[in-house]
Amino acid sequence: MAWLAKRWRHILPWVVSAALLVYVFGYATDWQKLRAATEAANMPLFLAFATADRLAFFLVWTWLQAMAMQRFVAQVPMRSVFAIRGGSELLRTVSNPLSDAAFFLGLGQLAGGRYDAVFAAALVPAIVHFLVMLGQMTLALPFLSGGLAGNRDVWITTGVLWLVVAGMTIATRLSAQRNVGVPGTNRVRDWLERFPLRSLRPFFVGFIALTVFDVLIQGLASRAFGVDIDWIALAARIPLLYLALVVPTLGNFGTREVAWAGLFAEFGDKDTLFAYALAVNAVFLVLNLMIGIVFLAHALRLVSAVRRARSEGEEVKDRLLHDPTDL
């Protein structure tokens, strides 16, 4: 059974992607309208905005992950984290979880095999980003046109997520103050004690800036493609898009198209929204390939040097952690 479950985790993204791609491009798409929407788009502007969006996420996420490593695990050089993250982006063309796993393993090698500490620190940017997006949705809710009836997806998702946060908070407090045994709360409490909120302020500032930029750049990119989406709707529903992208697919193809067309249906026809999402996926695919190719050799050499030094009982010297841009 364990073997079957492991195999299924590898097969599932292919199955989900195939089903979504068949639906989107074999059934739901009018190819003539899709081509017309693409031809009508201001492609130079769209490419500039989409590229800026992907690069901003790569730079900010990597910088904050490196900061988490330096503050809470080990003083690894920032450039080394960028090298490993850059190399792992090559795998993001196939699967986000696969890329994240490769990045995690690389950081573990830098930290001397302290995978538990690396995993705990890696949760810092992930949890902060989740809380910032939840706050973003909450702040946008009162300003959405259409009220509750027209935005049930946003209201329900926001309410459920806040209930989860509140439930975890209450369970953790009860576990600490009254010794009430709630499964998982000990680990949550240990994590909160290790990473108190006051130590996470730089991460909140970084992700708040990134989410503001993300709404702005996606609004500009969609407008360059001929889709004029309301700014408040973007702020409220972009987090829903990222939740949808958690579904394991190949390079997010199929998932992004379905999610984008469903979330912003009132701002454009289905085929134009499909065309926009497909173009975004294509740009991100090319950028992931380029980033991965640039950094892959340096990341592999770095991890190999660290592993060899540790196996020989030597200290890892700074010269092994060379600048990955030194071609």
Image: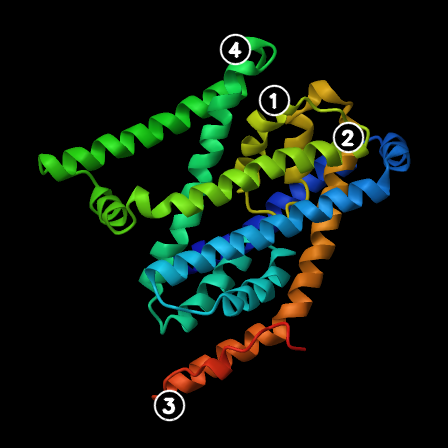
Tell me the CA gap for discs 2 and 1.
15 Å
Mark whose residue sits in front, 3 or 1:
1
Looking at the image, which residue is at 22% across and 42% down?
Answer: 185
> For the residue carrying disc 1, how many other residues have a C-alpha within 10 Å: few (<14), some (14-19), or many (20+)?
some
* Residues tagged 3 and 1 counted as in contact (Cβ below 8 A): no
Mark whose residue sits in front, 3 or 2:
2
Q: Earlier in the sequence, mark 3 or mark 1?
A: 1
Quadrant containing the C terminus is bottom right
> For the residue carrying disc 4, how many other residues have a C-alpha within 10 Å: few (<14), some (14-19), or many (20+)?
some
Looking at the image, which residue is at 21% across and 37% down?
Answer: 172
Q: Secondary structure at mark 2?
A: helix
Q: Secondary structure at mark 3?
A: loop
Give the residue number, with chain letter if any, for mark 1: 232
> For the residue carrying disc 2, how many other residues have a C-alpha within 10 Å: few (<14), some (14-19), or many (20+)?
some
Q: Is residue 46 left or right of residue 63?
A: right
Mark whose residue sits in front, 4 or 1:
1
Q: In the picture shown, does residue 249 fall above or below 312?
A: above
Question: Which residue occupies the foreground of this view, 225 or 157?
Answer: 225
Q: Earlier in the sequence, mark 2 or mark 1?
A: 2
Give the residue number, with chain letter if any, for mark 2: 223
* Residues tagged 4 and 3 counted as in contact (Cβ below 8 A): no
Residue 3: percent from left, percent from top? 43, 60
Give the residue number, with chain letter if any, for mark 4: 148
Q: Earlier in the sequence, mark 4 or mark 3?
A: 4
Q: Earlier in the sequence, mark 3 or mark 2?
A: 2
